[in-house]
Amino acid sequence: MSQVMLPAKRFVVSSVSSDAHMWNLVFLQLLLEEQGAHVTNLGACVPDDLIIEECRRSRPDALVISTVNGHGHLDGLRLIRRIREEPDLADLRVVIGGKLGVRGAENIVFAEELALSGYDAVFEADGGIENFQEFLGTLDAPAERPALASSGVAA
Amino acid sequence: MNAPIRSSEGAVAAARTQGRFSRYVHGAHADGRLVVQPRMGFADLATMREGLLGVRGADATATGTITLDSYTRVNDHDSARQALRTGAELNGFPLVAHGPDATRQLLDSVSGPVSASGGRDFPVQVRHGSALPYPLFEAMVAAGVDATEGGPVSYCLPYSRAPISAAVKAWAQCCELIAAQPDPMHLESFGGCMLGQLCPPSLLVALSVLEGLFFREHGLSDISLSYAQQTHPGQDLEAIAALRRLAGERLAEADWHVVLYTFMGVFPRTPVGSFRILEESVRLAVRSGSERLIVKTPAEAHRIPTIAENVDALEFAASIARDEAGRGAEVAPTESGVYEEARLLVDSTLELAPTVGEALIRAFERGHLDVPYCLHQDNANKSRAYVDPAGMLQWAEAGRMPLRVERGASRRPVSAKGLLTMLGFNEQRFDREQLTNGHLRGLQYPGRTARRGLS
Ligand code: B12
């Protein structure tokens, strides 16, 4: 957690439309800010339009989606398809993490479809933090998509 | 007290005529039995029915629960319908998408029709987490649901981005809708939970009582008040005593009981840790004279529990409750002033406006009430809490709340790692054994092995 990022990177941290959990968002904000980043935290139950609007307005270095209520495989998929339909957001780095389905350890089955649909990385549950740190280190290189081969889906 | 309360004559009469849910709860309490209840919700009707029948058949004094899915909670009923069509997995029962007729049939098939004496031998509560729930309340009334939960603050701040003023308006209409029914359903305040963790007891108690007063203001007299287990058994005992005392003083004309929730924050990951924290909550419920307990299972940290896991947790809780009933007092309540602080928060909030609803709006607007770490745009988010070395949950920052907070090392801003450590306090407290003791290694973590009970 000691990595220093210069110049300050900017992130939008957000939940998805049906997910009300906040501690995950509070945690991610602190984690990023401690590394010198600037974070806009959109909070819980965020409609797709609001996320898109904010990304368009603030052009962050990455959009970080966090969801744990088990609907991530539905809301997260819908969201990324919408984002990638917007020509000006096609290049935006977008990652998703948390508890992405209601299948416990088997939620990993959702990772592939999420990555193929346009996420630059997918992190399932607690195991994701180390891989997330690694991902942060790659922000200055161009995105490789689909992400599965490069950015390591974390189980 | 300046909050207008409905004509006391009607209220007193209502307090005598218990609703079908409370009748069951009070009956069990009079017999010395703790009512236990799961958090259980499945998307399809058949599994939901099987789950309710499993709870009904449990060796416990249990009421049923239908927990709703997150689409229904945010009024995205189209997405819920689409998931039902495609078979996509939801995290609960989409009541509005299934509709009131299907829900009524489900309820009748598990709890039978309401008897001539007005009772049910297996009442069922709908738990939802919806800030603007009028469409849901219409469906619940049409389906004949026995009980539900929520409140204009407790179902708004932690669950939505709806303005508190909109939630107050919607919840007033919902209360009035159920009050107008011949046999109104029971309503439980979720004020004793808020974000599940790191909210000190005095604010939880105050919010529960304030929501109880709001329910009264809008015509309801069959209610319950909640409190969620926190980090310290003695402090929790003090808090529940404070809740009962304050409710006794302020809600004397209502028919109320107290429902305790097994810890609502980051849960132990091991089966042993899970049952130990559940055990502590059962003993707390019995010692504090709480009438009802909502349990959690060893699946909590990992995924939605199966029917079998829910039934096991209920039966375990019932057996601990029987054991505790035969014991003497082993835990003493702390004396940290929870009652005084909660009373101050309630009274000073009520002074802000002529109605409870308006007072709640103003109190949050000016940070007079402030839930630690809550990101909702109408919450000041200036207050902070911490777990002290003795394990008690304390204020670190009061924000603009009228509380005295002792200055100390607790005021340092928390780091990401520090936050996880505080959130993980109970997880560590209860998992220690299984994570360190070789003799328990044969047990496997549920998330890694079992499949959940959805067909
Ligand atoms: C607190 C809590 C609540 C509170 C939330 C208050 C709030 N507004 O924040 C309340 C009580 C309101 C609540 C409500 C609900 N909850 Co809840 N909740 C929890 C609980 C107990 C703790 C969550 C928590 O605070 N974690 C602390 C944070 C810091 O950790 P985290 O969220 O796990 O995130 C970590 C990792 O996942 C990862 N991570 C997360 N996101 C990301 C993103 C990226 C990019 C990366 C790299 C990593 C990452 O990093 C974090 C740190 O390690 C969990 C169970 C548990 N874990 O014990 C259930 C849980 C998450 N809830 C659950 C559910 C289903 C619900 C409800 C639908 C009700 C229900 N059916 O039980 C509603 C949801 C309402 C909605 N519209 O979404 C389920 C989800 C099931 C699933 N996915 O299979 C859980 C697992 C409980 C369970 N077993 O049923 N909940």
Image (spheres, helix red, strand yellow):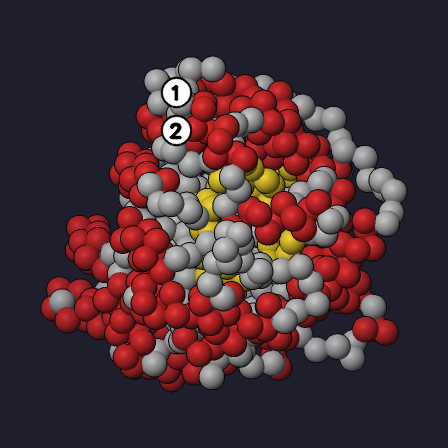
The answer to whether residue B82 is above or below residue B269 is: below
Q: Which residue is drawn at 52% across and 34% down?
A: B15
The answer to which of marks 2 and 1 sits earlier in the sequence is: 1
Residue position marked by numbered label 2 in the rendering: B217
Q: Which image quadrant is residue B162 in?
A: top left
For label 1, count other residues whose C-alpha is less than 10 Å away and answer few (under 14), some (14-19) or many (20+).
some
Q: What residue type is labelled 1?
A: Pro
Q: Nearer the viewer, residue A10 or B279?
A: B279
The chain letter for the residue carrying disc 2 is B
Spatial distance from mark 2 to mark 1, Cα to Cα? 7 Å
**Does dot 1 land on a helix, a strand or a loop?**
loop
Q: Where is residue B276 in the image (x, y as percent from the top left)?
A: 75, 59
User: Does the CB distance between marks 2 and 1 fall below 8 Å?
Assistant: yes
Q: Position of residue A10 (x, y in %)?
A: 31, 52
Q: What residue type is labelled 2?
A: Glu
Q: Which image quadrant is residue A143 in?
A: bottom left
Residue position marked by numbered label 1 in the rendering: B4
The answer to whether residue A89 is above or below residue B422 is: below
Q: Residue at x 63, y 65 (%)?
A: B297
Whether residue A141 is visible here, answered yes or no, is: no
Horizontal side of A86 relative to A152 (left or right) equals left
Q: Nearer the viewer, residue B101 or B266?
A: B101
Q: Where is residue A84 in the image (x, y as percent from the top left)?
A: 19, 71
Q: Which residue is drawn at 36% across and 33% down?
A: B218
Q: Which image quadrant is residue B83 in?
A: bottom left
Horizontal side of B368 relative to A62 (left or right) equals right
**Does dot 2 land on a helix, a strand or a loop?**
helix
In the image, are marks 2 and 1 on the same chain? yes
Whether residue B6 is visible here, answered yes or no, is: yes
Q: Residue at x 78, y 80 (%)?
A: B442
Q: Nearer the viewer, residue B260 or B322?
A: B322
